[in-house]
């Protein structure tokens, strides 16, 4: 009989896959941005755009989810419980796979999935771990 996966180990997998999706979305969105606004001259300029430009604002909640998971996993004073780990997994699931009307984030994500097979693959991997 197979035991159910440990929520903390599952959360680590979710984190890895969320990071991969985030990276693919950043690459994909950069291409679209550069087609519209021209080549971004440097990595520093791109980082500034990622953190300040409204074009990339829809990606920021993923960064926040990753940071929340990282903080929870790194907290040595208050080790993550299975229940708290499952709660974080559920939060990612609810955010990434919403039920109901599509949010601005979801519309942008759907567009990226449609135009970029690397994003579609990373999203499918994340979903399989949720």
Image (tube, rainbow, N blue to C red):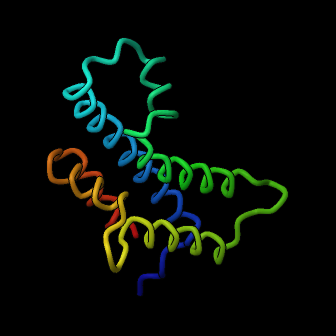
Kindly identify the residue that appears in the image at 45 percent across and 18 percent down: 45
- Compared with 77, 94 (above or below) is below
State which quadrant residue 99 falls in.
Answer: bottom left
**In the visual, does 20 lie left or right of 12?**
left
Asked which quadrant contains residue 102, the reply is: bottom left
Point out the residue furthest to the right here: 77
User: What residue is drawn where x is 44% and y is 44%?
Assistant: 57
Position in image of residue 38 (x %, y %): 25, 19
1 or 25, which lies in front? 25
**Residue 8, image x, y percentages:** 59, 66
**128 in relation to 104, above or below:** below
Count of labels in the image: 0
Q: Residue furthest top?
A: 41
Give left or right: position of 116 versus 93.
left
Q: Is residue 31 above or below residue 43?
A: below
Q: Quadrant of residue 32?
A: top left
Q: Nearer the viewer, residue 129 or 56?
A: 56
Q: Position of residue 92 (x, y in %)?
A: 48, 65
Q: Residue at x 21, y 53 (%)?
A: 111
The quarter in which the N terminus is drawn is: bottom left
- Front residue of 36 and 7: 36
From this viewpoint, which residue is outermost toward the bottom? 1
Is residue 23 toward the left or the right of residue 88 in the image? Answer: left
Q: Left of 115 or right of it: where is 48?
A: right
Q: Position of residue 67 (x, y in %)?
A: 60, 49
Residue under the image location 40 percent in, 70 percent down: 130
């Amino acid at each position: 009989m197979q035991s159910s996966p440990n929520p903390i180990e599952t959360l680590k997998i979710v984190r890895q896959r969320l990071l991969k999706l985030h990276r693919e979305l950043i690459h994909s969105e950069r291409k679209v941005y550069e087609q519209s606004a021209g080549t971004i001259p440097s990595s520093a300029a791109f980082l500034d755009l990622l953190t300040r430009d409204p074009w990339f604002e829809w990606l920021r909640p993923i960064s926040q989810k990753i940071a929340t998971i990282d903080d929870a996993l790194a907290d040595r004073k208050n080790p993550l419980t299975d229940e708290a780990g499952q709660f974080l997994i559920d939060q990612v699931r609810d955010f990434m796979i919403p039920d109901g009307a599509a949010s601005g984030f979801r519309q942008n994500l759907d567009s990226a999935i449609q135009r970029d097979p690397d994003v579609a693959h990373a999203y499918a991997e994340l979903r399989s771990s949720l």
